[in-house]
Image (cartoon, rainbow, N blue to C red):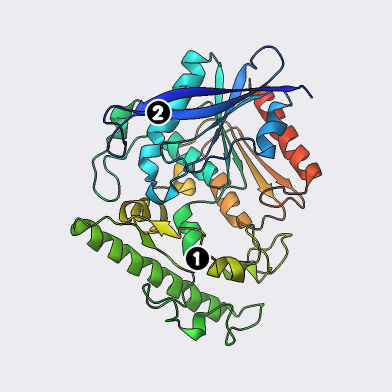
Amino acid sequence: MSELTMRWVATAAGAAHAAPDTERVPLGGLLLQAGERPSPSIYLFLRPAGVWHLLPIEEAIASRGIDVLAVSTRYARNEALAVAEYTLLDIGAWVRLARETLGYRQVNLLGWSGSGTQSAFYQEQAVRPTITATPDGSGLDLAAAGLEPADGLVFLGAHVSRARMLADMIDPSVIEEDLSTARDPAFDLYGAMAPEPPFDPAFIASYRAAQLARIRRITAFARRQIERGVPDPFIVRRTMADPHFLDPAIDPNERLPGRCWLGVPCAVNEAASGIARLTTPEAWLSQWSIDDSNVDAVRSASAVLTPLLVIENGADDAVPPRQLRDTFETAASRDKTYLRVPGASHSYQGQPHALAMVADAVSAWASERH
């Protein structure tokens, strides 16, 4: 393995509607390289909203001789405002920079967790653009944006969509959004009346229906706010209550029951910060509304003809394995590979062996296809 060099790079994307600048949106990224010369191919490591430079997986891949460009979007450190459709303009700017300015012959999208979903959405809209407006009704013609498809896609523990994830995780016991203590004890997964796992299928069915009903109540509120011209941010309480975290028989893998990738689920459920905790009406419709979000990796995969690598973490404590398998099975690519890494958690924390296995596989896959 080679010693890494790192340098900041910058580009700009079309402003569209969500930009603070009326012309161009400045973007920053971190380029990781091993050796004296750039590799023939590069991975764009995407984050839809956060800024997660220098994760262990990025350094592990780059140290094996495949350059990695860790990039952010216009919503860096401001996830509450993120509208997924606008981030595609930013990803498109990074793809062009990697090809035209940095000179890489092959540009692959590397998506971990939610980044995989966004990678699939980007690739779909680059090869088969359908978006002419965001879910809140703002005009955005992606066909006119000139998005360039990537040469390959890699999904690491990637869920189908944020909307699907939240629909499975939101706490259905909340019956009044403005009153956190107003709860239905029959659906309080961590309350005294909660059944013990393994859960009865009838309970799961009614629980899922109650989750969907809560999602739709919030969506109706978001739409009313947009119609009234009051797009103020709002709080969504208790969003970490998926029975999957407590019952290992639900979409089974090697995960530990009673844990999630953020810690103890019942504590995360009550925490001041969490999944979708703060959002705007526009961001809610784009990211979190199961009926309105355009982001769906299973649907997007049907447009993916480029080489595809899907990696399932065997003990993933965030993403159920069924979601990865659905994406893989739907993908139209003739060159697609599915790899399961036994015992790997969602983030590979404290798992150097699993991290090395993933980095080896991702690096070899790019080298073979160059």
Please rate how many residues cluster around mark 1, counting C-alpha atoms within 10 Å: few if below 14, some from 14 to 19, many from 20: many
Q: Is 51 drawn above or below residue 220 in the view shown?
A: above
Position of residue 35 relative to residue 137, above or below, is above
> On the rendered image, what quadrant is the C terminus found in?
top right
- Report the residue marked by disc 1: 239
Q: Is residue 241 visible?
A: no
Total marks shown come to: 2
Amino acid type of the residue that numbered disc 2 sits on in the rendered structure:
Pro
Element under disc 1: loop
Residue at (77% x, 49% y) in the render: 350
In three-dimensional space, the C-alpha distance between marks 1 and 2, rounded to whole angstroms, equals: 32 Å
Quarter containing the N terminus: top right
User: Residue 160, which numbered label?
Assistant: none
Left or right: 195 as drawn, with respect to 1: left
**In the picture shown, does residue 173 fall above or below 361?**
below
> Residue 321, how many percent across, how many down?
63, 55
Q: Which of the two residues, 165 or 227, is positioned nearer the viewer here? A: 227
Identified by mark 1, the residue type is Thr
Q: Is residue 186 visible to the viewer in this orientation of the structure? A: yes
- In the rendered image, residue 351, in percent from the top left (x then y), is placed at 78, 47
Instruction: Tell me the residue at 33%/69% (across/down).
Output: 217
> Which image quadrant for residue 143?
top left
N-term mark: 1 or 2? 2
Q: According to the image, label 2 marks what residue?
A: 26
Closer to the camera in the image, 329 or 346? 346
